[in-house]
Image (cartoon, grey):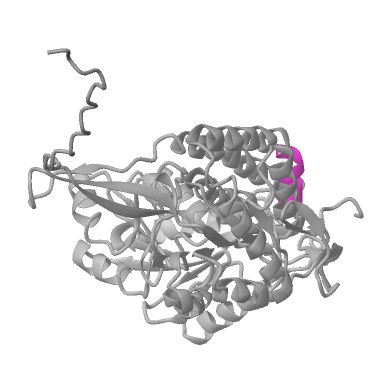
Amino acid sequence: MDTLPKGLMIGGRFLQAASGATFPTVNPATGIELGQVARAGKEDVDAAVAAARSAFEGPWRGASPLERQNVLLRLASAVEDSIEELALLDTLDVGIPITRSRAGVAGAANALRAYASAARTIRGSTIENSVSRDMFSYTLKEPVGVVGAIIPWNNPVNTMVGKIGPALAAGCTVVVKPAEQSPLSAVRLAELCLEAGVPDGVVNVLTGFGDAGAALAYHPGVDKISFTGSVKTGQAIIRASAGNMKRLTLELGGKSPDIVFADADLSAAVPGAAMGAYLLSGQFCAAGTRLFVERPVYDEFIQAVVDYGRELAVGDPLDDSTVLGPLVSGEQLTKVLEYVESGLTDGARLLSGGRHLTDDGYAGGFYMRPTVFGEVRSSMAIAQEEIFGPVLSAMPFDDIDEVLSAANSTQYGLASGVWTSDVRKAHWLAPRLESGMVWVNTYGNYDKAVPFGGYKMSGLGLENGSEGLDQYLRTKCVWIDGSRPVPSAAAPTAPTEISSQVSDE
């Protein structure tokens, strides 16, 4: 595996960490080390921020929208040409099924094209004020500056593009810190940035652990942090950013409710609800892991979800037929299994799954099958806390008011799902569900053109769409007195030259 990308990318150069430190990255499908990767420390963070600042104050800040657009279009083409390579790196590093990895990278290329177009749409506005008809006021949109982008491990290429794309479109520069579980594709993306002509220092990549991310959050040379990850880390970033009042975009955890009414199309709701919880083996923030089913169809529906989960192909993520790969690490697997034990201790009934798979074909990997709990109460930890694994907590309900209260009963507010044939129920629930997204008769749709963000403890700010781009821009207001200029005093006239000729008269 010596050909795997391994170094830090700072100011357009690939370097080892200043300390010389490295760390292993492990294939979660086998538990086997893939290779050693440079581990960034504070000195490397300082160097990367300095490179990003120099690039921002240099030619990149003066680049025209057309120039930024062309850079992003070249990068999009480079990513598209590297779909197989980038998908393989994410699958090896994280265990994402290869078909899903390919789709994610293809989506990242398309997203870069959307951000390229957005670079040409940034504009201020002229505002008619009430001070005076002669007073002219308008706004300018300016790049925030140096952005620290801290990336999670569950969808690496797509999430990294979701941060560097709008940052570059806005005219910012970026220091990327990928999760320690998924460093490989981030370094390869850095190489593609250089190949696509992104100027040195505009994108920098630091592989490493949480100490590097913390140094980035505390750094006075960073103007904004965009972070996707846990609530606990998000809160730490808020505290760290207070020193220079950084702007923040935080996409944090979720414990999303998925509500199924008896009048729903159950043939669509069963796979929709199941994959809404099990996609990426439950390792995505908007997973609909709290399943509320109207009582008349509860038993039938839950059994159908259990049966559906049992048929899903769990296995080698490099196999095109695999639907669910391993969990990302042994540590994550242990955490999920501890939640399974917690559910059993609290009195929930385990209907399927719930164990580490160690049979032939799974040896060494961090696999588990889809897990369903019945007889769950909303107060249980498995119904309140983000597990980040393929664990579904099922609960019956009797009426719309009851399910609304239960759905809103957690600290999170990222997403919600509603399955019904009654449009009135959908319209009534949508504004009352305390979440940044509501899916109706579908679950998990995602597009970089559509804003994505959470309520309550699920985050601050928005990603994607024009709202996401605006997170990387500052608004400046300009006032100009446009009243009629007062004529200046007449300038003294130069003395007329007297002819030296004297009349004979």
Q: Nearer the viewer, residue 181 or 346?
A: 181
Q: Is residue 348 visible?
A: no
Magenta span: helix, strand or loop, mainly?
helix
In the rendered image, the quadrant that contains the N terminus is bottom right
Rendered location of residue 283, percent (x, y): 58, 62
Q: Which residue is drawn at 20% across and 49% down?
A: 427
Horizontally, residue 77 falls left or right of residue 409, namely right
Furthest toward the bottom, the residue is 345
Judge whether residue 362 is colored magenta: no
Q: Residue at x 71, y 56 (%)?
A: 95
Q: Nearer the viewer, residue 461 or 231?
A: 461
Furthest toward the front, the residue is 504
Q: Which residue is drawn at 44% across and 66% down?
A: 248
Horizontally, residue 456 falls left or right of residue 423, namely right
Rendered location of residue 153, percent (x, y): 64, 61
Instruction: In the rendered view, tell whether residue 474 sits above or below residue 17.
Output: above
Instruction: In the rendered view, tell whether residue 82 sits above or below residue 181.
Output: above
Q: Nearer the viewer, residue 297 or 500?
A: 500
Judge whether residue 90 is colored magenta: yes
Number of labels in the image equals: 0
Q: Can residue 216 be seen in this view?
A: yes
Rendered location of residue 103, percent (x, y): 61, 40
Furthest toward the right, the residue is 2
Residue 112 figure quarter: top right
Residue 342 figure quarter: bottom right
Q: Which of 286 and 440 is in front in this view?
A: 286
Rendered location of residue 387, percent (x, y): 53, 72
Magenta stretch bounds: 83-91
Horizontally, residue 403 falls left or right of residue 324, namely left
In the rendered image, the quadrant that contains the C terminus is top left
